[in-house]
Image: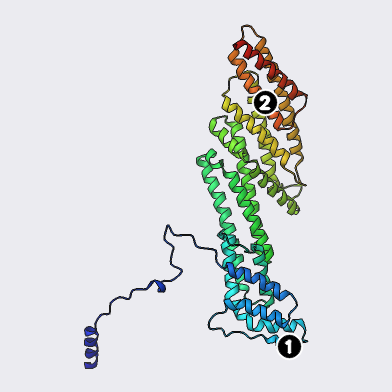
Amino acid sequence: MWPMKRKEQETRNRAVQPPRVLLPSAVSEKMPMRSGRAPVPLRGAREARDAVTLVRLLRGTITPLRGDEVLALLEPHRPRLVPKPVNPLAAMLGQPQGRLLEALLRPTAPIILDVLLPRLRDHLIDRVVHNKSTAEDGLPGALEVATALRALVALLRGAGRGAVLSVVSAIEADARADADRLVRGETSATEDDPAGATAGAMDGLAHALLRFEARRLMLETLGATVALRDVVYQSRRLTRHALRRAAEAMDGFGADRGIKALHASLAALASVDGLLVVALRNLDDQEEHREEANAFVEPADRKAMNDCLSAAWRLSDTLFDLVGKAANGGDLDELLFEALLRQLRSLHQFCTDLDHAGRPPVLDTLERRLAERSRALAGIAGERLVGILLARPADPAKARRLLARGQSLAQLLYDMGQDGDELEALALRLVVARDALNHAAA
């Protein structure tokens, strides 16, 4: 009992030490970065360059001089606790190349396993998953680094495979999260604001599909077949989603010819390049997965493309209906008339520029139809303009409005490559009408 009391008294009488303050050098490097600081640089840039060089050296003829080059290359990466390796090839002259390579890897394996492979893992995750970049010159491409990583693991007979699996898992998780975010985000936005959801969405979806292509190449390089199948599925899912969004936007204007629906359809066709990227990816998917087609069930990829093309056909009917009324003298805002012509131009460009071995035949039919109906509209606009000029009493305001619309139709024919008799006839009537109006005004 008494020793316990004496111990408690000593504890109470012991002076309380002041709290320790961490010096700046003792602060962990993994503390969260404060807002306003420079972004975290790309990790493992030097290790990536040296790893590519190391693989090139190890694939060549192994000699004692080559061994000195390998040791000199790895010396800056050697941890302090790892003893400096000695070149073992000087006493192995005349030995087979396989034995020389194994002897060289034996003292260098700790450096490769403990330093190079983890840094290569971080480097690839930063570039492929976090989309980081650097302005350093001489940095090898991500595929070169991935090839070097896989080659080093193969040279070490599977040791360090965890670095490859970490990169594969990070790419697979990022692809799945990216597809989920884009699909859910577009769906929720479309329910609230169809025009705002579609505006700029096609470019963003096309850029996301290009990132999926980079992921596919990376996984193919790393030999991750299981993860590659999942990434391909996510890419196909995103492609179908993009085509459905474009079809909904185009069908929306056919059902409701309001300004909001017009803006949505304009946004869907504003970036023809983005729509072409999506369509080409879909056609590639159809070629790669032909075995899914049968006589009873239409594959999802083909259905998404057919629905989009059907919506484009229906949109062209609506556009020609409105443009035809305007070219015949109907009341229509000039900005709206230009917007309708811009959609016709975008549809024709989409049909013309979509060059693929699996190109649907309906695209050729739609392309011819757009050109034929545009030429017919040009003829109607020219005849109507002449009729307004010859009418009595004359209506100069209406004639000038039809003159402006005729000039827009002539530009549409020129953009479509329809520089035949119809364009020449319309241009002649436009020149005559302009001179007549200027003479009447003078």
Q: Is residue 303 visible?
A: yes
x%, y% of residue 60?
74, 75
Could you tell me which residue is drawn at 57 percent across and 27 percent down? 335
**Where residue 168 sits: x, y (%)?**
62, 65
Mark number displayed over residue 339: none
Type of the residue with mark 2 = Leu
Among the two numbered marks 2 and 1 on one chain, the one whose residue lies closer to the N terminus? 1
Q: Quadrant of residue 312?
A: top right
Residue under the point 74% across and 47% down? 296
Query: Which residue is at 69% across, 34% downward?
Result: 313
Quadrant housing residue 165: bottom right
Which amino acid is tagged 1? Met
> In the rendering, at what x and y percent does residue 137 appear?
61, 62
User: In the picture shown, does residue 49 fall above or below 425?
Assistant: below
Q: Quadrant of the N terminus?
A: bottom left
* Secondary structure found at label 2: helix
Q: SS at mark 1?
A: loop
* Residue mark closest to the camera, 2 vs 1: 1
In the image, which disc is placed on residue 92?
Answer: 1
Quarter residue 59 falls in? bottom right
Viewport quadrant of the C terminus: top right
Query: What residue does disc 2 label?
Result: 409
Where 394 sits versus 253, above or below? above
What separation in Å lies between label 2 and label 1 (alpha carbons)? 83 Å
Looking at the image, which residue sits at the far bottom? 2
